[in-house]
Image (tube, helix red, strand yellow):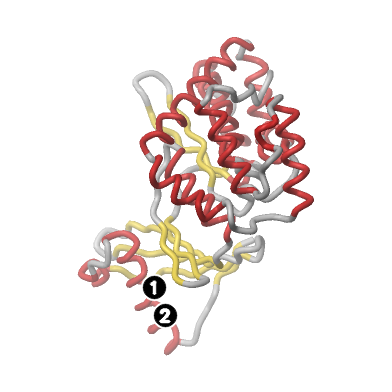
Amino acid sequence: MWRTVFYHAHDHEEISKDLKLLYAHLKTDGDVEVIQHLSVARIDFCTFGNTQPFRVRIINRLNDNYDHFYIKKVDASRIYGLELENLISPNRFDYFLNQDTLIEEHIAGIPGDDFMKKNLDDNEFNQIRMAKEFIKFNERCFVRLLGDMRSYNYVVDITPDIEGSQFRLRAIDFDQQSYEGRKSFYLPQYFKDNNPLIFLGIKHMKPEAVKQYQMEERSLIATRVKTSRTRLNELFKIMIHDKLSYPDKIEQLKKELIKHHKNNAFASCKSMGEIVRTNFVLLLQKDFKQSIEL
């Protein structure tokens, strides 16, 4: 879905200079000395998605190493999604925005769909770790209500370990943060694209192990919530008054979560922000129900 963009030579010179300045702000807190040996190798435009992003490839002329960053349209759900990702997930990355423009660093990893085509035929030990990470990723998405985690909306970060490899799934698309009304939309397990990882779990995981990994991830999220309590409270003060979705979707999600958790705490929620906050409250109260059964 990416198309390379070309500019008139005069325009390209000015655009390249500004893009390198943006990269300096993103990576070195605005230290412009680094841009002297940088060049813009390519600018691509994605024709798919509501943010219509530009992808900029930056080359370091000293060693030919390259990096990417993205320029996107601002979307309210996406900003809340990015903030929640930095606060309650094990992943951190930089971004900044100005009015209706978002600048976002590249998240390294193998796209989920490519990973499942090429990497699942591995030894049993690594397959178990893949299934374990998917369970944890599923839990993270459901707790913070990040939707639409089809295989092309996340990447897999592989880290070689003493024995085998460690795997981490990282979301790269946050446009569907607490927007949809269907509960299943926030559970990656229900997308057919993810079936290969689900089948690994069915093959290698007993229900007791699934529950253990869910509890581990909830405990980690709860710890991050407690250490980021002030910042989260400030975020929710804004989020609960923002219009992230439509009334019918809010009502639908409330009803489905009440049924899922067997808890009426969602009944008084009037916005998606309140629903997300209530999910976190249930997590801290250890009243969060199991999200996946294999």
Residue at x-position 60% and y-position 32%? 138
> Does residue 65 appear left or right of residue 280 in this picture?
left
Q: Residue at x 52, y 20 (%)?
A: 215
Q: Are marks 1 and 2 in contact (CB under 8 Å)?
A: yes
Q: Amino acid under label 1?
A: Leu
Estimate the x, y position of residue 135 in percent, counting from the top left. Answer: 58, 26
Q: Residue under circle 2?
A: 15
Picture coordinates of residue 134, whole percent (x, y): 57, 29
Residue type beneath disc 2:
Ile
- Residue 69: quadrant of the picture: bottom left
User: Label 1 neighbourhood size at 10 Å, few (<14), some (14-19), many (20+)?
Assistant: some
- Left or right placement of residue 122 versus residue 200 in this view: left
Secondary structure of residue under mark 2? helix
- The residue to which callout 1 is attached is 19
Query: Quarter holding the N terminus?
Result: bottom right
Residue sitting at x 68%, y 23%? 199
Res. 12 image quadrant:
bottom left
Q: Among all residues in the image, which is located at the extreme front?
A: 268
